[in-house]
Amino acid sequence: MNLRLNSEFGTLKAVLMHRPGKEIDRLTPYNKDFLLFEDVPYLEALQREHDAFSNLIKDSTGAHVYQLRELLIRVLYDQTILLSLMREALLKSGMVYLAEDILERYSTAECATILTAGLKIHELRRKIPNLKAGELMESAFVISPCPNLYFQRDPMAITPSGIIFSSMKMDGRQREADLLRTIFENHMDFKDNVKRLYPVLGHDNPPSIEGGDVIVLSSKAVAIGNSERTDEKAIYHAAKAMLAEGPVERVYEVHLPQKRQYMHLDTVFTILDENLVLTYPDAMNSVLQTSLYTLKGIKDGKAQIKREVLNESLLTVLEREIPHLEILHTADGNPDYSQREQWFDGANVFAIGPRRVISYNRNIHTNRALRQLGVDVLEIPSSELSRGLGGPRCMTMPLSRARF
Ligand SMILES: NC(=O)NCCC[C@H](N)C(=O)O
C-alpha cells in the first residue's frame, strides 16, 4: 500500500474506520458543545449503524476495513510508544507524573481504551487508592475523551504526494491526530510507506489543518479549505511540501465561510467521478475567493512557491480542473430540502467507486437526484451517526483505491 491517493472515487481497496466505543458514553448535555456534538447519542444504536456502514463497505467492494482500535493496540505493545502517548495525553491535566503508574496497572488493551475514551479521577482511584487529586472533582477527566474519533477523515489526509497529519483546531479533538500519526509512523503495515508532508519536523505548535478540508481533485491538483478548522499558514506549509514532492502541481486554497455547518470543505462538496461533483449550492455561492499555490523553482535544495489570489469562485476552479464537469446540487437544489439535508451532511457522501456512493438514508431528496443521474446510491441508517454532524465521507479514511 503506497499511501498516496490520486482520486476521491477510484474503486476502494482499503479503508480505516473507528467503531465508536466508550468515548461516546462520555458525552453529556453539559460537555457536548465543547466536544462538538449536537446531541448525546445512544451508543448501542450508534454502533449498530456504524456496523451497518462498515459491513456495507466490505460487502459491496470487498475492500479491507482496518479498525483503529486493533491498529492502536498493536503499536502500543511497544512500551516506549505507549509511555510517550500516555504522557502527551496527561499534559492538559498537568498529571504527566502518573504515566508510569498507569502503565503498570492497566493492560495494553485497557490503555488503548484510556487513550480513546479518557480517564476520570474516580476511575483511576480504583487502581491507585491514595491518588492525590488536589482541587479536582472525582468526576474530572485526568485524560479527556475523543468522541469524534469515528470521524476518521479528519486526523490526517492522504494526498498524491504523501500524508498530511492534522493539527486539530478544537480542544475537544486535539489528541486524535497524535493517535493516528503514531499508528501510521509505527505500524508495520504502514510505516515504510509514510511520506510525511505535515507537520514540518521541528514545528512544535503547528498551525491547524484538518483532513476534512483536503480534497484531491486529481494527481496534479489538491483543494484545501481555509475554514473554521484550517489556517492559511498550515495550507502554505502543506502546499509547499506537496509541490516540492510532486506529482501535485496546483494547490487551491478555498476560503469557506466560518460556520459550523461548513466546518470543512468536504461538508460542502465531494467528487463522485472524473466529471461529477455533488455540492451544497448556498456554500458554493458564498465561496468567492480562492488562491492558487504553484512551484516557482528550487533554490539551494528548497522549494520556492508562489501564491496568487484568484478572483474566482470554487465552481470556476472546479470547472477548470475537471473537464466537462457535471454539478449536482444537494436535494437537487430545492432550497427547503437542501438546507435540511446539508445539516445532515447531504453533500458528504462516500464514493466507493466511480458513480457509486454510500449516503445517509435520511437525505432522500439528494439520494433521489443522485439516482436520476445514474449514480448507484447505497444507503446507511443515520439517526445516531448524524448527531456528531458528520457524514459518510467524514467517517472514512481511504488508504488504497484502484487507479481508474
Ligand atoms: N470532515 C468532517 O466534516 N467531519 C465531521 C466532524 C464532526 C465533528 N463533530 C466536528 O465538529 O469536528
Image: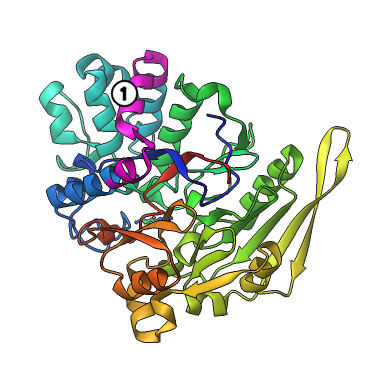
Residue at the image position 38 percent from the left and 77 percent from the top = 331
| Foreground pick, 376 / 97 | 376
Q: Amino acid at mark 1?
A: Ile
Query: What's drawn in magenta, residue-wise?
Result: 56-82
Residue tagged 1:
73
Q: Residue furthest bottom?
A: 335
Q: Quadrant of residue 344?
A: bottom left
Instruction: Relative to 373, say whether 381 is above or below.
Output: above
Residue at the image position 62 percent from the left and 57 percent from the top = 223
| Foreground pick, 201 / 1 | 1
Residue 79 covered by magenta stretch: yes
Residue at the image position 24 percent from the left and 40 percent from the top = 141
Instruction: Relative to 390, say whether 200 is above or below.
Output: above
Say whether residue 131 is visible.
Answer: yes
Say whether residue 264 is visible.
Answer: no
Q: Position of residue 55 (x, y in %)?
A: 26, 43
Q: Quadrant of residue 301?
A: top right
Specify the principal SS of the magenta part: helix
Q: How is the image coloured?
A: rainbow
Q: Quadrant of ligand 1?
A: bottom left
Q: Quadrant of residue 403?
A: top right
Q: Position of residue 332 (x, y in %)?
A: 42, 79
Residue at the image position 37 percent from the left and 68 percent from the top = 346
